[in-house]
Amino acid sequence: MENLKEILSELSRGCVDILPEGELEKKLLISEKENRPLRVKLGIDASGPYIHLGFTIPLRKLKKFQEFGHTAVLIFGDFTGKIGDPTGKNKTRPQLSDEEIKENLKNYKEQVFKILDPQKTEIRLNGEWSDKLSPQDIIKLSSKMTVARMLERDYFEQRYKSGIPISLHEFLYPLFQAYDSVAVKADIELGGTDQKFNLLLGREIQEEYGIPGQVIMTLPLLEGIDGTRKMSKSYDNYVGITENPTQIFGKLMSIPDNLITKYMLLTTDIPEDMIKKYEMEMKDGKNPKDYKVILAKKIVQMYYSKEESERCEEEFNRIFKEKGIPDNIPLIKVSPEDKDIKITNFLKKYELTESTSEASRIIKGKGLKINNVVIDDFNYQYTPKKGDIIQVGKKKFAKVD
């Protein structure tokens, strides 16, 4: 295969695991020899109707496979969505109704085709095959996995040891997800690092049913714009790809400095050598704001247009200038203990005000802003995050380092 090394390099960009080692290369060679596109699977459990930048990471990887002639198999979990993926949960996840699933799926297709090539995409609902499984089929499938093996998963083990109930239907979720790989004859499956167990189980179950095991490719979970928790609509720290361009641009300008290059690597096609160059320039003292602009413009251009990206930059600069926010803002090092600290105490502690009384007066006069949002509650519990811009009065600024 011509340029196999380059193809593997592009396909593996940003991946955490590609397992078993060396199998992806073998699959690509077999695909060329048999003149058969690989079937690359990605599952969505339909728990929410909007796609954010975190979920574009596996979608963009699917797109890269399509560019090399392979087929994206996108599985909407209408069946498994009724179970609810227990991954990372310390309690049973609420099951979705048929109506909720239908509503959540309605807008997905329009959004995914902002990224994927419709001509090389196969969209399936896993209810097509899972709804038809008989009790005997389910017993046969369940016999492929032990309770001990299920309890190897951290979140099940923690709940079991803590006496938090685990429902039997939660054990079935990874089994049904694995059976999806049997039903669509997946050659490769993509997923976040939190899905590694489920993806490996898919490979095992395929082999149990006499089908060649899939290669699994895990991708990093993207931190949200708060810089702490993974991007999620639940945490209100997401950047939705269908949000208006100004919102997208503004949110990306607010991310912590240490996430700039990670966002570039995982959510754009900016060349890796260029990203490394940007990283070195920031280490050498160049203003991270300039690189956030590069990132924000790139994302807006990807989902809207170059003209929109330039308009957003001009608007952001105008607002920034009008608000009187200086380019070189003093940095404050906050303590890890400052989680949910009362805002008046925070301002006094870091000498942004001389006293809590002064802090209260400024808040009463609507003179306190965090990331351009007025804080008017004396009892506001503040958790500082890297990159936050705090404005006290008209001229005092600080940035969380």
Image (cartoon, rainbow, N blue to C red):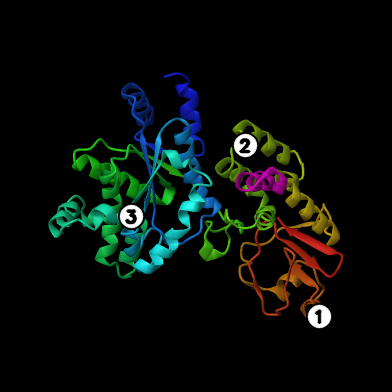
Q: How many marks?
A: 3
Q: Position of residue 51 (x, y in %)?
A: 51, 55
Q: Which residue is mark 2?
A: 270
- Residue indicated by mark 1: 361
Q: Residue at x 73, y 52 (%)?
A: 312
Say few, some or many: other residues with alpha carbon within 10 Å of mark 3 (under 14 / 14 to 19 / 20 or more).
some
Please report the residue visible at 48 percent of the width from the left and 45 percent of the height from the top.
59
- Decide if residue 240 is on the left or right side of residue 293: left
Identified at 72% across, 73% down, the residue is 375
Quadrant where the N terminus sits is top left
**Where 338 falls versus 296 (above or below)?**
below
Q: How far apart are the two marked residues, 2 and 3, measured between alpha carbons?
A: 36 Å
Q: Is residue 105 above or below residue 26?
A: below
Q: Residue furthest left?
A: 136
**According to the image, label 3 marks what residue?**
153
Residue in front for this viewpoint, 177 or 285: 177
Q: Nearer the viewer, residue 223 or 113?
A: 113
Report the mark closest to the observer, 2 or 3. 2
Q: Which residues are magenta?
A: 295-309
Residue 387 picture location, percent across and down: 69, 56
First in residue order: circle 2 vs circle 3: 3
Q: Name the quadrant containing residue 106.
A: bottom left
User: In the rendered structure, which amino acid carries the disc numbered 3?
Assistant: Arg
In whole angstroms, how far apart are the C-alphas of marks 1 and 2? 47 Å
Which structural element holds mark 1?
Answer: helix
Crowding near the residue tagged with mark 1, few <14, some 14–19, many ≥20 C-alpha atoms within 10 Å: some
Which one is earlier in the sequence, the residue at label 1 or at label 2? 2
Q: Is residue 373 above or below residue 226?
A: below
Q: Nearer the viewer, residue 104 or 253?
A: 104
Residue 181, image x and y in percent?
Answer: 29, 45
